[in-house]
Amino acid sequence: MKRFLKALTTLSLTIALLVVFASCGSNKFYKEWSEAGAKIEKENIFEVVELEDVKTKIANGDTFVLVYAASTNVSAVSAISSFQAQYDYLCTNGEEIVVYVLDSTEYDKSSERTEVKKALGVTKELPKNGAPLVVTYIKGVTDVESNWVDKIQTEQFIVNGSLDYSSLCSYIYRELLAE
């Protein structure tokens, strides 16, 4: 009986620590991006991931959305704000939507960006200045690449030469990730 209680206590502590670490990552994202000017909620739809996580999702054939960006870029802050605002507007039934964020500041060198580009399976070069790159995946295959405006899947979201986040988010929330 003592072993069982000890195992149960250990398991409980492990779960508690995992919850604390997970919430710290979420709080760090919220703090960093909201201080940069993003209009997001403390409990938001974003989850910061590492490159290995993205590779795993692609290999598993997952359908998901990835934003490769940095909070130091004004366009990225605007994009993150748009994703949150459109979620608040379009997803009124409490849909569980996650937008994964890969911090581009971790990949400063050209060789690192080349590795990320290859891992993400995107065609065009990655932005160097923290500008946002939005990539959607359907069953692990790239669908929309926001920096490839001539791609058939992307061009429907281009208005006056710029990416229209409202229409992209509508597609993402109502079609791509709808269950």
Image (cartoon, helix red, strand yellow):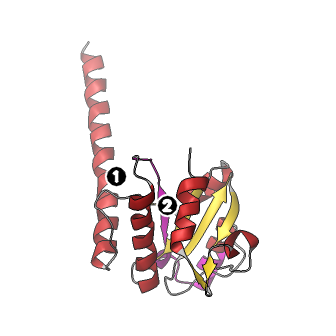
Q: Between 89 and 58, which is closer to the camera in this rendering?
A: 89
Q: Which residue is mark 2?
A: 100
Quadrant of the rendered image containing residue 164:
bottom right
Q: Is residue 109 magenta?
A: yes
Q: Quadrant of the N terminus?
A: top left
Magenta part of the protein: which range? 94-114
Give the alpha-carbon distance from disc 2 to disc 1, as whole Å: 14 Å
Q: Left or right: where does residue 163 sit relative to residue 34?
A: right
Residue type for callout 1: Ala
Label at residue 98: none
Instruction: Identify the residue shown where x is 39% and y is 47%.
Output: 94
Where residue 159 appears, x then y in whole percent?
Answer: 61, 82
Q: How many marks?
A: 2
For residue 96, say whether it is visible. yes
Of residue 171 and residue 20, the one placed in the foreground of this image is 171
Q: Residue at x 39, y 78 (%)?
A: 71
Residue 104 lies in magenta, yes or no? Answer: yes
Q: Residue at x 49, y 82 (%)?
A: 130
SS label for mark 1: helix
* Residue type highlighted by circle 2: Tyr
Within the image, what quadrant is residue 73 found in?
Answer: bottom left
Residue 177 vertical placement versus 129 (above, below):
above
Q: Is residue 7 above or below residue 45?
A: above
Q: Residue at x 31, y 56 (%)?
A: 43
* Image location (x, y in percent) of residue 93: 41, 46
Q: Decide which of tag 2 and tag 1 comes sooner along the chain.
A: 1
In the picture, measured across the screen, residue 98 lies left or right of residue 150, that is left
Element type at marker 2?
A: strand
Judging by the rendered image, the residue that carries numbered circle 1 is 22
